[in-house]
Image: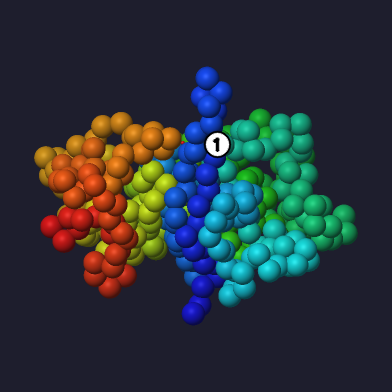
Amino acid sequence: MNSLLIAQNIRKNFTIKDNQGRAHLLKAVDGVSLDIAPGEIVGIVGESGCGKSTLGRTILRLYEPDSGTITWKGKNLNSFSREEMKALRKAMQMIFQDPFSSLNPRKKVKNIIAQPLLVHKADSPEETARRVEAVMKEVGLNPAYKRRYPHQFSGGQRQRIGIARALILEPELIVCDEAVSALDVSIQAQILNLILDLREKHGFATLFISHDLAVVEFIAERILVMYLGRIVEKASKTSLTENPLHPYTRALFEAFPSANPSRRLSKKHIVMGDVPSPLNPPSGCHFHPRCPLADEKCRQSSPPLSEVSPGHWAACWKSGV
Ligand SMILES: Nc1ncnc2c1ncn2[C@@H]1O[C@H](COP(=O)(O)OP(=O)(O)O)[C@@H](O)[C@H]1O
Ligand SMILES: [Mg+2]
């Protein structure tokens, strides 16, 4: 067993009040399990609103799960002491989609990047300055610009600032939530390559969350496909790319065509309507109203995530088709 993090059967609900004041349960994450090995890049993909960010935040314990367990290096997080929890906060970092809103506009870049060090009171001022300059160089920012403010940088550079801030504590796991989604495609590739280079050098594991399958396919080694709070398919990148089993995964490949023509699928298989509300999810398989293969069984009962071939899992009654 060589997992850095194991999440088992995680559930996270929100209570939403309607305009008559009635409370409704929204199952944002509805029984998700995943594991990440040290240094591994795991991708999570799915349309907006399917629970990816909630899952990422719950894994980092920014949200308390309603149920399920999270194990870090073999130890249940529930049994962590305060000291261990503090160390864990250093070991897990997050990079957000929007560097505009996640960077304080009134702070100089050097202070933004140093912030995690200050929170953890790690170093002397000289050592902090040295580490800030080193990490700026590593992410491709000129340390001469350390006194500038976020608005003086481009979108791609701002994302590099976010990466530097995450990197400075030498984390073992970085959760990237839509980290390149706000950037132009050419800049996206630069940032993705930067993350890959840094991973090579530092060996941190990454949970890479995106609605864009092409981006996840570029960076991840293993991919989990999420639909309305649940994992509907998981496989190695190669296996998922060459043989997507779930009709939803196939639809995503249609929506985000990759450079790989061998994987192009016939449009006739694909029916994409709107994502149903997680407040009122469809019966049975949540995907059935949009699925070209759905039959009565799919409308009535929810398919379990099962291993269709070694390491390739799908939650579909038709996945053998
Ligand atoms: N803090 C919150 N309070 C209430 N509902 C939320 C909250 N965060 C997310 N949701 C709802 O949970 C569902 C999943 O959201 P989210 O995790 O942000 O999805 P994704 O990141 O895949 O777009 C959505 O229906 C969203 O409206
Ligand atoms: Mg999100």
Under mark 1, the amino acid is Thr
Q: Position of 265 compared to 277: left or right?
A: left
Residue found at the very far bottom of the displayed protein? 1
For the question of whether residue 313 can be seen, the reply is yes
Residue located beneath label 1 in the image:
15
Decide which of 85, 202 is in the foreground and name it: 85
Residue positioned most to the top: 19
Q: In which image quadrant can residue 91 be found?
A: bottom right
- In the displayed structure, would residue 36 be above or below residue 130? below
Residue 26, horizontal then vertical, whole percent: 48, 39
In the image, taking residue 281 as reference, residue 3 lies left or right, namely: right
Residue 278 placement (x, y as % from top left): 41, 38
Q: Residue at x 81, y 52 (%)?
A: 118
Q: What residue do we see at 61% from left, 65% from top?
A: 172
Q: Nearer the viewer, residue 316 or 43?
A: 316
State the colouring used for the structure image. Answer: rainbow
Residue at (54% x, 67% y) in the render: 5
For residue 259, say whether it is visible: no
Q: Residues within 10 Å of mark 1 (few under 14, many from 20)?
A: few
Mark 1, ligand 1, within 8 Å: the answer is: yes
Count of numbered badges drawn on the protein: 1
Looking at the image, residue 99 lies above or below residue 316: above
Q: Is residue 237 left or right of residue 206?
A: left
